[in-house]
Structure formats: C-alpha cells, structure tokens
Image (spheres, grey):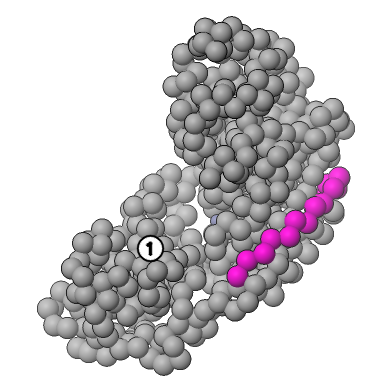
Amino acid sequence: MLLTDIRNLLKNSKLRLPLLRNAGFMSALFFPEPSMTRFILPLSLCLLSHASFAADSQLLDATSLNRAAELRDTALQQNEAYALLESLTTEIGPRMAGSPADARAVAWTEQQFKALGYDKVILQPVTFPVWQRGPEKADVLSPFPQQLLITTLGGSIGTDGKPLDAEVVEFASLDALKVAPENSLNGKIAFINKRMERHKNGSGYSPVVAGRSEGAVEAAKKGAVAIVIRSVGTDSDRLPHTGQMRYDAAVNKIPAAALSVPDADLLENMLKRGKPVTLRLDIVAGFNGTYTSHNVIGEIRGREQPDEFVVIGGHLDSWDLGTGAVDDGAGVSITMAAGALIGAMKQAPRRSIRVIAFANEEQGLYGAKAYAETHKDTVANHQIGAESDFGAGRIYALTAGVSEEVWPVLEQIGTVLAPLGITTEKGKGGAGPDIGPIVALGMPWASLQQDGTDYFDLHHTANDTLDKVDPKALDQQVAAYAAFAYLTAESMMDFGSVPKKLEEKK
Ligand SMILES: [Zn+2]
C-alpha cells in the first residue's frame, strides 16, 4: 500500500480505526515501538495533515459541554475528595504493599466505591513479593561520632543481623560511581551525594532517582559492602525519603539506605575535612514470601457503549513512613470523587468510566502490569486514560498523547477546564506510571498536570500526611477529572486506541 492510498483511506475517519486495529502493517507504520508512540505520532500525522481534522459529528455538542461545566462547578462546592482522603489516612493510614493495611485499604476502597454509587466494583488479584522494613540505624563511629538519620530503600537487604562498619567513599553522582576503578570500593560504603532540584513539573526527579534505584548494583560492582544516598527530595527536614531500589541477579546484593537531606549535608561536611569517616549501619530488612492484593476498579456504566472505557485513577498503596496522603491517597480520592459525580448524573455518558485504584505501584507497578496483561486483547476498548499520581497540588495544564485528528476534542475539553486555571498544551508531558503499561499497548493518554513544586518535599517521607493537603486544591482537581472523564466518555470521537499484543512488544 502506498502512502497516497493510506491518505485516501484516512480521509474517511470511520475506516481509520478498523484499519489500524486489523492491519499489522498500518500499526507498524504508525506505532513501530510502543514506547515511542507519543513521539512518532505528531511526525507521522503531519504527513497527513489534510486528513487530520475532526468531523463536526465527532466534536462535542453544546449540551455535553454545558453538562461538563455543571459537573465542574458542582465539584468546586463539594469537598468529597478531601472527605475520602481524610477517611483513608485516618482509618487505614500507611498501606505498604503486602502489609496487613494493604488488605484493609482494598476493603476500604471497595466499600467506598459502593457507597459512592458506582455501578460495579471489580477486584483484580495482583501477586508480588513482600518486602518488610525492620529497625534501621546509622552512626558515624569516627572521626566525629554521632547518629545520622536514614531509612532503608525498598527492596534492600539488611546488614545480616549485625552492625556493618566501613569507611565512606563519596561520589557526586551515580555516573561518577560508575567510572570508579574496579575493586576501588572493596570493603567500603559508597555515598552518592547528588542534590535534587526543585521544579514545578518534577523534572528534578529523573536526574537523581537512578542513584536510588541502581546505586546498589553499581557500588557492589566496585566492591562496596553497602550504599547510602542523599535522599531524593527537595526539603531540608530531617526525614529521609525511601523509595524502591533494585538488584541485579548477577551482582552481589548490598544494603541500601537514604540519608535525610540535612544528614547528607552533615556527612558531606565531615568528609570535607579529609580524614577517613567510618560509618556503622545496622539494618533489618528483606523479602518474606508473596502476597496477593487487588486492583480495585469502580465502574460507571456507559449508556451506549458500555464496553468502551475511559480510565482514570491512582495507586492505592503507599510507603510505610507517612500516611500516603499526597502519594497517592490524593490521586485515588480525586478520581473516585470525580467518577462518583458522573455516576450521580441523570444520564450516564455514552461510554463507561473506570476508576482504578492500582495495587503496589511503589515497588514495581505490579497492579498496572497486571491490568495491562489482563486487558491486552481489549486495549482497543480503552479509549483514553489519565492518572493522578503527583501529589495534591492544583492542575495547571492538560496535555495528551493523541493524534492530530483527535486534538480538537481535547481543545474543546480545554474550554471547560480553562476557568479552573488550566491551559491546554500540545505535545508536552507523558502518561503516568500506572497507565504506562496499557499505554505501551496502545491506549491514548491525557495528563492533567499538577503543580509539583512542593511534592518532593514530602514524597516517600514520614511527612506525607493529610495536613499538607489543601481541600480546595483537591476540589479543583476533582472538577478537572470529572469534566475530562465525562467529556471523553460522552464524545463520539474514537480516540484511537491501537491494540498491541504483549508478544509484539517483546
Ligand atoms: Zn505515587
């Protein structure tokens, strides 16, 4: 088939999706690699620009837009998300995956979906290894004896039931550690001392987080017996930030912990004096069996296309140190409240809405992967998804990974969001972590981007608690999610989900 033929076929938008869905050739042309979809789409579709306008029949009508505006305005008066978050943090609290609170959180969510009037609640089993944190302590033994505040990184082993004493070797970054000579860390503790920058969109995270996730493997390759890192955080509280790390089966496992930001400063100042610094780590941690938790899915049934879904949600698990108010109790509460508002409408939207409280995001996206695996053959029914997992700050932008043809509908949705202080921006951002695996299989995504300026002050710390959350900011987000989910579910537009089987991805 020639490109001109494809152009002609694409002029008829009704033909477009069945073709994309059935023709491996077309899929390969437009979506050669799932992870590249959002980068390639704008390029490929600009070749077809004359075919890339939504037909009037696919645009939202005035009635739908007015109803969405009503939903938006109702949400702003409601405080429903805050009530849910207050309940979750008070009655369940920290809910680390595989802990006893995990099951209580699942039961809480199921009960809340039912109480909020959702048409259907689905529990999808999700199995994963259980990691447990025990006591954790760090002391400088010499030359300036004092305690340093640490927390063990998720997935780490402990110090084998006894204190581990070793000299500290500092590195400015993970990259600096990677180029250290072989065996140069034999018997030593590596210290990655890279500071995270504060940015509204959280862009300071990715340059630093690899030190947390990969540091133990790189340090062990050089002979280290343990690793400590400067917390991946932007605060100056004496509260370390936990988070997941991983091992490589081919490399010796060593314990890994994070120092609070002020404690990393303290260790840095000691090392500046040029004398060897000996640190004692005494950590109990490790894996203990497997556990089956659940993705909890609340569904508002669509009136015309009940088997087509708009997906919103967040993750139900949290780390154990705080009560998981901003990460991600807020996201779960916001999207549950948004779905409930739509469920309370006189007439349901055309398509169904699924609000998913994902299991065990923190330790490796287990719930997200299970959802994608289960739905790999029905990805095409997943019209579009958006996820709330960046704290409780206000939403300031709508972005999306959709084709040019679909974009006018996003702009229409943007007109309903504009009074909330939300701009519509093409070609920015990306899908969230939990919808990531199904987006990789072909589901289009949208992102309601939150102000994350303060997010990494709290992220994965004991300070992640309800008092940090502004109820009015939650209402603004419920308003945005409700309007977005309603309009995408009501839309006549096919958002262009392209099924891709897991096998193709491999
Ligand atoms: Zn999160």
The majority secondary structure of the magenta stretch comes to: strand
Q: Is 102 drawn above or below residue 493 in the view shown?
A: below
- Report the side of 206 relative to 19 (left or right): left
Q: Is 249 drawn above or below residue 201 in the view shown?
A: below
| Residue at position x 57%, y 22% in the image | 26
- Report the side of 205 relative to 482 (left or right): left
- Front residue of this view, candidates 370 and 470: 370
Q: Position of residue 498 (x, y in %)?
A: 62, 30
Q: How many marks?
A: 1
Q: Which quarter of the rendering shows the N terminus?
A: top right
- Report the side of 296 relative to 183 (left or right): right
| Residue at position x 38%, y 63% in the image | 214
Q: Secondary structure at mark 1?
A: helix
| Residue at position x 45%, y 66% in the image | 246
Q: Which residues are magenta?
A: 116-129
Question: Does the magenta-highlighted stretch encompass residue 73?
Answer: no
Question: Does the magenta-highlighted stretch encompass residue 122?
Answer: yes
| Residue at position x 26%, y 58% in the image | 175
Residue 341, can we see it?
A: yes
> Is the residue indicated by label 1 positioned so its CB lies within 8 Å of ligand 1?
no
Residue 397, can we see it?
A: no
Q: Which residue is mark 1?
A: 214
Q: Position of residue 94 (x, y in %)?
A: 62, 70
Kind of residue indicated by mark 1:
Glu
Q: Residue 212 occupies which quadrant of the picture?
A: bottom left
Q: Position of residue 366 (x, y in %)?
A: 61, 58
Q: Residue 402 occupies which quadrant of the picture?
A: top right
Q: Position of residue 217 (x, y in %)?
A: 36, 68
Quarter, ligand 1? bottom right
